[in-house]
Amino acid sequence: MSESKLIVFIYLLGETKAIPAGIFTHDNDLPMGIFAYGQRYLERKNCLPVDPVALPLGKAPREVLINGGLYGSFRDAAPDYWGRLVIAAEAKTAPEAMSEIDYLLAANATRVGNLDFRLALNDPEPELLPPNFNQLADIITAAAEIESAGTTSPYFLQLLRQGSSMGGARPKCTVEWQDSLWIAKFPAKGDTINMPRLEYATMTLAGNCGLNVPEMRLIQVGQQDVFLIKRFDRERTGSGWCRSGFQSSLSLMQWDEGEHHNWSYPAIAGRLRRFMTTPHIHELYRRMIFNILVRNTDDHPRNHGILFQGNQAALSPAYDIVPALTRPGVTTDFRLAMSVGNQGREALLENALSQAEQFGLLKGQAKGIINELVHKLRNWPGHFAECGFSAENIEQFRPSFRKEKMYG
Ligand SMILES: Nc1ncnc2c1ncn2[C@@H]1O[C@H](COP(=O)(O)OP(=O)(O)OP(=O)(O)O)[C@@H](O)[C@H]1O
Ligand SMILES: [Mg+2]
């Protein structure tokens, strides 16, 4: 039997230093772990739950479900493919040689949300702070070298490592710029189109369609386009960075990464309705419709987040919305990553209408949202041209955008 024991730290509201909240123990052979809040933590007036949904404050230790090697909410604070590649390069080992717990512990101050994980109570705050915007050219070189060779020079590696603890598969790095933290997303090896520009164009289009999106920029670093998106879980204060809690829909729903058949927008909406106000649920509906209309089929539950400001829950601003490219006439029918209605994942507006009431919407209201988006999206080619895409590129993207009639 091998047992993991971690001290779970939390950055409380307005604080820039983490304090211990409790202990997580997990026998690696079992599908359950145990989390127990510390007595002294519970005595604090401003203590917050480490998982506001599944781990409410309380003295009794609680069993939690282990999915893919880690408890879901803690997994959100660990790196994914990209961050793991960088951490493994630093450890001079193959990414698969490290465990989930190794990665969780190796993540630094740029991990998503307000949790931290340490082996001992007196382990220090993570020392590596995000690199500076001015270092982006070196960071991009470092990312390209890591992608092609699995390694880079110690200086480059250190730079990249400083900002590489959040999730996702694409090359990226958190950087500090204009008194804020931003995620810089780079071109990846093997991209056939300009992904940073495509993400910028689609995400700003989403903003024009009324979706709640973070501040964004498209910048040039040398010959490369870089997409910058402001981090919504960090805010500068005099002495450092304050953090908001973050949870993906995957962990909110306690879904497993392999359980695709369970993933469902109406199910997420049903859960969110228990602790969020209606406008947030309507926003989720709007995102689902937008994803159908721009063919974003990578809308998996890790790409929908929940933010916690103290005990206040909100749907996080949208992120990672990009059309899947397709050729004309090849596949006009497609599916989203999650079920949208009675016909499962079929990306059809009729389907999206079928369970609108789960989102607290009357059919007429749902049709209103659909019509508004269909109307606003008619000018996508103009918007993409403004974002610097050529007429040729726009033709390339055309099959991804649905031509839909208005209802009624
Ligand atoms: N603006 C933001 N502020 C804070 N956290 C964010 C922001 N955007 C994304 N994240 C977090 O970082 C993770 C990775 O971001 P993103 O989904 O954009 O990367 P990706 O590599 O394109 O992902 P994927 O593997 O889904 O393609 C997200 O899952 C989310 O936890
Ligand atoms: Mg993502």
Image (spheres, rainbow, N blue to C red):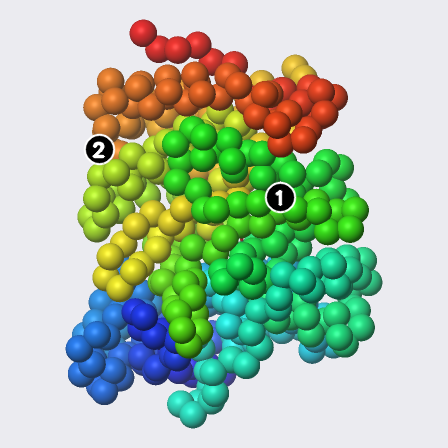
Q: Earlier in the sequence, mark 2 or mark 1?
A: 1
Residue 262 as seen in the image, left or right of residue 60: right
Answer few, some or many: residues within 10 Å of disc 2's Cα (few below 14, many 20 plus, some between 14 and 19).
some
**Type of residue at label 2?**
Gly
**Type of residue at label 1?**
Leu
Tell me the element at label 1: strand
Residue 113, placed above or below residue 38: above
Pointer 2 residue: 360
Residue 389 occupies quadrant: top right
Instruction: Judge by depth and name the residue closer to the eye, 110 or 29.
Output: 110
Query: Is the residue marked 1 within 8 Å of ligand 1, measured from its CB?
Result: no
Residue 125, percent across and down?
47, 83
Q: CA distance from mark 2 to mark 1?
A: 36 Å
Tell me the element at label 2: loop
Residue 322, percent across and down?
57, 37
Q: Are marks 2 and 1 in contact (CB under 8 Å)?
A: no
Residue 233 occupies quadrant: bottom left
Residue 42 visible here:
yes
